[in-house]
Image: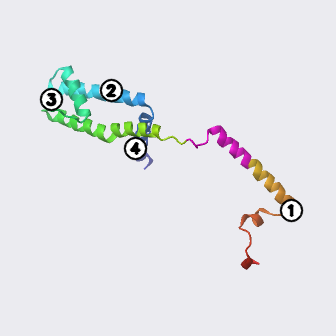
Amino acid sequence: MDALLWVPRKLYRAVVWLANSPGTLLLAYSILIVVCGVLYRHFENRSIGDSIWWAVVTASTVGYGDISPATWEARLMAGLLISIMVLLVIPLITAHFSSKLIVNNDAFRHEEQEELKENLRITRALLEQMAARQGITSEDSAGPPAGPSDR
């Protein structure tokens, strides 16, 4: 069962890695355009300029119609290119820029979190010392205070 989950986890990590870096996302987009352009040139016997133009227009989902695939291989590749762009690349770009717009100014920095944790440790130790001096066990202090009906 773990062998079946390995591939989706790796794919998910690769997508997260791409999404967190606009440079790698732009590079991946460029590589996708070039690879699809070269394959289109091979499938359709077009010039490299026309093939790259077709890849850009198809990836942008504009689809001017000035160049369209005739072979089944090129049509399949066009479908994959459009699907990858619409379902993966465009949402990753949108998510990246959206996450940059959402900034929590009240969030604690790592150093502040560590200081708070240390202060809580000190406070807990002091409370345990005070409880030990008064003879209160941790079981006694764990529950809520006794109400009038508990007495």
- The answer to which image quadrant residue 84 occupies is top left
The residues bearing labels 2 and 1 have C-alpha atoms spaced at a distance of 71 Å
Can residue 98 be seen in this snapshot? yes
Q: Is residue 118 magenta?
A: yes
Image x and y of residue 69, in percent: 15, 32
Q: Which residues are magenta?
A: 105-120
Residue with the mark numbered 4: 8
Say what amino acid the circle numbered 2 marks.
Answer: Ser
Image x and y of residue 126, in percent: 80, 52
Q: Please give the label number shown on residue 75.
A: none
The residues bearing labels 2 and 4 have C-alpha atoms spaced at a distance of 24 Å
Q: Please give the label number shown on residue 134.
A: 1
Q: Is residue 94 magenta?
A: no
Image x and y of residue 24, in percent: 41, 29
Mark 2 and mark 4 residues within 8 Å of each other at the beta carbon = no
Seen as rendered, the residue at the extreme right is 133
The tag earlier along the polypeptide, 2 or 4, is 4
